[in-house]
Amino acid sequence: MALLDIHDLSIAFGGVKALQHVSFSIDSGIVYSVIGPNGAGKTTLFNLITGVYTPTSGEIRLDGAAIHGRPPNELARRGMARTFQNLQICLNMTALENVMVGAHLRLDRNLVKAALRWPSIRRRDADLRDEAAELMRFVGLDRYTRARADSMPYGALKRLEIARALAMKPRILFLDEPAAGLNPTETLEIDALIRKVAATGVTVVLVEHDMKMVMSLSDRILVLDYGRKLAEGTAAEVRQDANVIAAYLGAHA
Amino acid sequence: MLTEFFQYLFSGITVGATYAMAALGFTLIYNASNVINFAQGEFIMLGGMLAVLFTQAGLPLPVAVLLAVVVPTLVGVLVEKSVIEPVKGADTVNIIIITIGASLVIRGLVQVTLGKNARALPAFSGEAPVTLLGAVLPSQSLWVIGVTALVVAGLWFFFNRTMGGKAMLATAINRTAAQLVGINTAWVLTLSFALSAGLGALGGVLVTPITLTAYDAGIMLGLKGFVAAVVGGLGNGMGALVGGLLVGVLEAMGAGYLSSAYKDAVPFVLILLILFFMPRGLFSAKTTERV
Amino acid sequence: MRDPRHLGLAVLAAVLAVLPFVLPNSFYLDLAIRMAINAIVVLGLNLLIGFAGQISFGHAGFLGIGAYASAVLPTHYGVHPMLALGAGAAAAGALAAAVSYPIFKLKGHYLAMATLGLGIILNIAFRNEAALTGGPDGMPVPSLELFSFTLSSDRDWYWVVAALLVVSVWASLNLIDSPFGRALRALHGSEVASKVVGVDIARYKMAIFVMSAVFASIMGSITAHYVGFVTPTVSEFFHSIELVTMVVVGGMASVFGSLVGAVLLTALPQILATFEGWETVAFGAILILFMIVLPRGLVPTLAARLGKGG
């Protein structure tokens, strides 16, 4: 059975049909990419799957359980993590604390114990600090473990989002344009990082404009255009699809 | 029964017209700058107090009224130039505290120079009441309602038919785009303070013969104007007008039928109920956050 | 690695311990007590405004609930003052919990409007229920007994309030540096990011709103017992504004900023009282000046100058 099953998913904002009758499924342990021109509905799809938006119709199943319309915090509990196209870093906190927030659900969140400096909470926090620093090293942010988030450059913040998502220990990770705005060297580094993450067994779902990266990285690719599914398959299949060539790749040729 | 109802209705519309003018003032400034001007109530008070001062100084009524509107307008410009412009782009809370600081300065100055006593202003066309649908109301009510109607018509003309008004609307909709097409948005902000101070003062002048005024009368009037501006959704001119009248009428009905002691609570209960069910006011469209 | 903030706590405790022995007279002791009371309220309010990013322009209403619970329940119903204090805190907490879900769906000026409205409605109720509250003139409050020990002298009050302040600062420092506190600051930084990592943001907003309301109510009770009299001005809109101003002047999201803001703005009216009649003008002008010159508040600005974190 697929890890994630999307069936006949649609959403409309007012009269605008942002996504229409999209169906696909993602197997566990693969890198799955969603591509398409601007406005094709890629980020909207991510927002629907991760619970930020509620679909107008259709089904989303994770491990067979219907999850559409469930709030994001419940989906986090089920092992879903994501990053954002427009950075959503908490600039009022340190970089390390941003990563620590990712571990939220794994911690004792009791208010009274926290206020009383309960020993078990202090100990767990000390461990978590090391764990978060380790994650920052994993994503290549060694030099920022003591930095404030608002003092970090854009490229580093994109990785910080990935570190925060990994702190959730997710089963499935959604990356929304992780290479957008990065220079070619940084893009290669993100490419390598995604491979590293996938190698740990996390299912990665990717929205990305960098075709080279997508084609080399993805096990399967979904092509969206004007909110509809245009094609789906391996990189080779998608590359040869007549519809895709006409509507999307053709436009760039 | 019906007479009583009309009595409350008309007195509600009269006060509501003042709230509506204050609410329009909040709306103008909010649209020009996203600022909520907590000093708005002080302009209402200033209008009333100055009208009293100038008539007592022997000036003919029309001159006194004119001056009582012009002076607060200039004060509004002064406030904008001296304390709002320097902090452009500051946090909402900081700007709110600044406008509260400005209101304290205005209120304090009036208290020091004109004293703490309540002041009365004679009605514009004599004290004889008018009877309408069985309800007896002061003739001044007609002045309040009539002038408010004229002001609303004038504002409509200004925003729809003149370049200045269109520039203000454009700034409200998209400041950057407005700047790109050559609109001087700093000037728009100044104009919005001038207009809303003038509107508030005019409302204050008109309603003072009915309600009296004092140095601290602006606090409640301003807060109720804020309520009226939020009722229809901030930034919505029609909403401000309807909100003002609604707040005024419900307050009068509440005072008449329920409890006069809790009259002042009515607008706040109303706004809480509205916001609980329609978080962006009565007339707002649903928006989706982009991430 | 010692946290500089815990050094701050030690300094605070030391200052509070020697203060009553160096203050020249009872006027200053009284001022110190009122500063400490305000500091505790502002501490709770800063957790809500500065750390969680949710404004409240109605917190004086919660102070009023505590103050009037401590005045009305013992006077009219013979309730023990400690029990009355608890009842007030419970009522304030319950009210905050009840309104928190619809209120915190609101943002920006709409949230300001709703909290402002809540505070004003409470104030009008205290003003109008004259049979119970004495109306605009207020009513006397019986003295507070702590386990058969009656608090009466200003010295007694000072130690109680100083101890409460130290504990509150300690607890606040612990709280912001815990899983709960990080979630709170995260929802300020980005609501959507905190939802996605699993934070139930409505619950966190409710928890901190209830907590700050309970803080305010308890301190309202303590003020009422300390002063021995309560009037509706305790719950006025202007008092809510004063409290928010203390938060902003001291520094948003700064525990020690809360103390500095409370101390300064409690002292200011005393200093300005010598201006005879001009105090309102001066107070307003100083607020404006402060917001223009030090928009981030005293403590964060100083900390940035010294090159250290919050």
Image (cartoon, coloured by chain):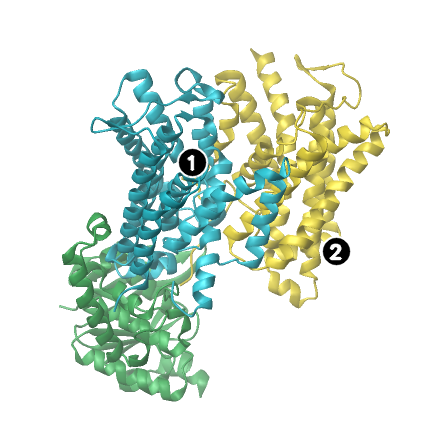
Chain colours: A green, B yellow, C cyan
Q: Residue B100's quadrant in the figure?
A: top right
Which of C49 and A27 lies nearest the eye of the viewer? C49
- Relative placement, left or right, of B39 versus A51 is right
Mark 1 surroundings within 10 Å by alpha-carbon count, few (fewer than 14), some (14 through 19), many (20 or more): few
- Disc 1 residue type (three-letter): Ser
Instruction: Indicate the quadrant containing the C terminus of chain C: top left, top right, bottom left or bottom right.
Output: bottom left
Instruction: In this rendered view, identify the residue nearer to me: A210 or C190.
Output: C190
Task: Identify the residue shown where x is 69% and y is 32%.
Answer: B204
- Quadrant in the picture for residue C207: top left
The residue pinned by badge 1 equals C26
Q: Element under label 2?
A: helix
Residue matched to label 2: B163
Chain under numbered label 1: C
The residue under label 2 is which amino acid type?
Met
Give the label, 2 or 1, closer to the camera.
1
Can you give x and y, in whole percent of width and height, for residue C250 in the image? 45, 53
